[in-house]
Image (cartoon, grey):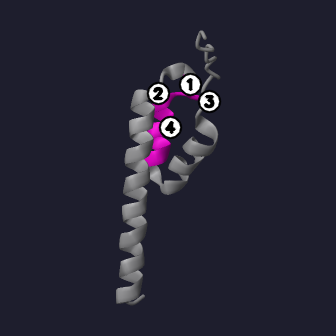
Amino acid sequence: MGELTDRQKGVVVIVLIVHLILLQLTWRDLRRRPDAAVRGRKRVWRVASGVNTTGSVAYWLFGRRPAPAVAVAAAPD
């Protein structure tokens, strides 16, 4: 196996940056979201998202419970 070309190195760097951004967003959301609003344990989602980008994507697609609808009271006339 030879070394990576400059183009391949660039792709690896871009993928790493995307992974780190998604990881930061995922962990921030997990930190702020109450336990009841997460499907499963937060610790498992942190590990899964840290392992690879697929874990972060899975959290955003399946790990979050929908926010409850907030009733807005009508303003008195």
Please give the label number shown on residue 45: 4
Marks 1 and 2 close (CB-CB < 8 Å): yes
Disc 1 marks which amino acid?
Answer: Ala
Q: Nearer the viewer, residue 1 or 68?
A: 68
Q: In terms of sequence position, does the residue under pointer 3 or pointer 2 come before the other? A: 2
Write the residue at 56% across / 25% down: 37
Q: Which residue is mark 3?
A: 65
| C-alpha separation, residue under disc 3 versus residue under disc 2 | 10 Å
> In this image, 8 relative to 70: left or right?
left
Q: In terms of sequence position, does the residue under pointer 4 or pointer 2 come before the other? A: 2
Q: Which residues are magenta?
A: 37-50
Please give the label number shown on residue 33: 2
Q: In terms of sequence position, does the residue under pointer 1 or pointer 3 come before the other? A: 1
Disc 2 marks which amino acid?
Answer: Arg
10 Å crowding of disc 1: few (<14), some (14-19), many (20+) = some
Element under disc 1? helix
Q: In this picture, is 22 found above or below 64?
A: below
Q: Nearer the viewer, residue 20 or 50?
A: 20
10 Å crowding of disc 3: few (<14), some (14-19), many (20+) = some
Decide whether residue 45 is among the magenta residues: yes
Marks 4 and 1 close (CB-CB < 8 Å): no
| C-alpha separation, residue under disc 4 versus residue under disc 1 | 13 Å
Q: Nearer the viewer, mark 4 or mark 2?
A: 2
Q: In this picture, is 69 found above or below 75?
A: below
| C-alpha separation, residue under disc 4 versus residue under disc 2 | 12 Å
Whether residue 3 appears in this view of the structure is: no
Q: Which residue is mark 1?
A: 37
Q: Main secondary structure of the magenta part?
A: helix
| C-alpha separation, residue under disc 1 versus residue under disc 3 | 5 Å
Q: Residue at the far top: name it.
A: 76
